[in-house]
Image (cartoon, rainbow, N blue to C red):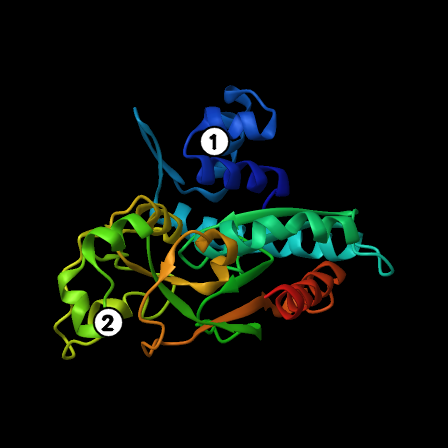
Amino acid sequence: MPLDWDKLRVFHAVAEAGSFTHAGETLNLSQSAVSRQIQALEEALQVPLFHRHARGLILTEPGETLNRTVREVFAKLAMTEALLTESRERPAGRLKVTSTTGFGSTWLAPRLARFLQLYPEVSVTLLMDDSDLDLAMREADVAIRMHPPRQPDLIQRHLASFGWRVCGAPSYLKQAGMPQRAEDLDAHRLVVWGDHRPPIDEVNWLSEAGRRPGAPRRAAVEVNSLTGMLRAVQSGLGLAALPDYMGSELDGLLQVLPELKAPRLDAYFVYPEEMRHSKRVSVFRDFLISELATHG
């Protein structure tokens, strides 16, 4: 028998929510109605789709297989619906943008008001995540990434190259002294990125500046957020290398060792092939390019 779309929609909601109750809230259905739909689907397929536990539901192996396909189908449908309902003349509808937390909070979020003044019929969802969301699975429409896309089926546009500033608070430098060369960093407290999945390649380059390769300095503090690193430096904790896209956020800090050779930080605008003709995507891309050209 052909699979019922309504039952698949309910199944997908339960698989994502992990419980009949939460799925029912999402679908505006009672828990018993959701449970009946799942039971009917399992009977039609003649396989169990969930292991039922007191703490919730876990997908069985057949359930995992079905959910992978269902998630992809609904993602494609959502993308198609967005493209069909968008006006050809005027960009409209929701645009889901993902960005690293550092770039999203310090550079992008303050500029969204200007974008929405230009395109009032567009609404933006900004998803700040230092891991790469899956654009092909519709976790977001477009991404701003600090590395080239690792998925071959995505369209990319190089947006800009940024530099770094090694910064410290005046109070810290008054107490610890101003480093004159890279080797002097051995005597300073460093604040570095502290996660095994950094959003930026070579984010901890300062740890090895003036050291032999493979022998980085031990950091005083590790933080898995550039904004958190900034706040630690502002408090007088120590020195950190921060991207210069942070702009006015770095005001009040003193730059040290400006001559240090640092890796360039490249930003890319990334989106799936299906979004190539989306008006929202093209105007957002052009807005970013314009902002970077005129405001840095």
Q: In this view, does 131 lie to the left or right of 213?
A: right
Viewer-side residue, 177 vs 118 = 177
Residue 193: x and y in percent read 28, 57
Q: Which of 67 and 209 is in front in this view?
A: 209
| Res 138 visible | no
The residue at 51%/41% (across/down) is 12
Q: Name the residue under label 2.
A: 180
Q: Which residue is drawn at 63% across and 52% down?
A: 111
Q: The C terminus appears in which quarter of the rendering?
A: bottom right
The residue under label 1 is: 39
Q: How crowded is mark 1: few (under 14 residues within 10 Å), some or many (20 or more)?
A: some
Dot 2 falls on a residue whose secondary structure is loop
Left or right of 136: which side holds 192? Answer: left
Badge 2: few (under 14), some or many (20 or more) residues near its Cα, within 10 Å?
A: few
- At label 2, the amino acid type is Gln
Image side of residue 9 versus residue 234, left or right:
right
Residue 24 place in picture, x, y as percent? 54, 26
Q: Which of 11 and 147 is in front in this view?
A: 147
Hey, what amino acid is under mark 1?
A: Gln
Q: In the structure shown, which secondary structural element does the residue marked by tag 1 occupy?
A: helix
Q: Let me know if residue 203 appears in the view.
A: yes
The residue nearer to you, when weighing 31 against 142, is 142
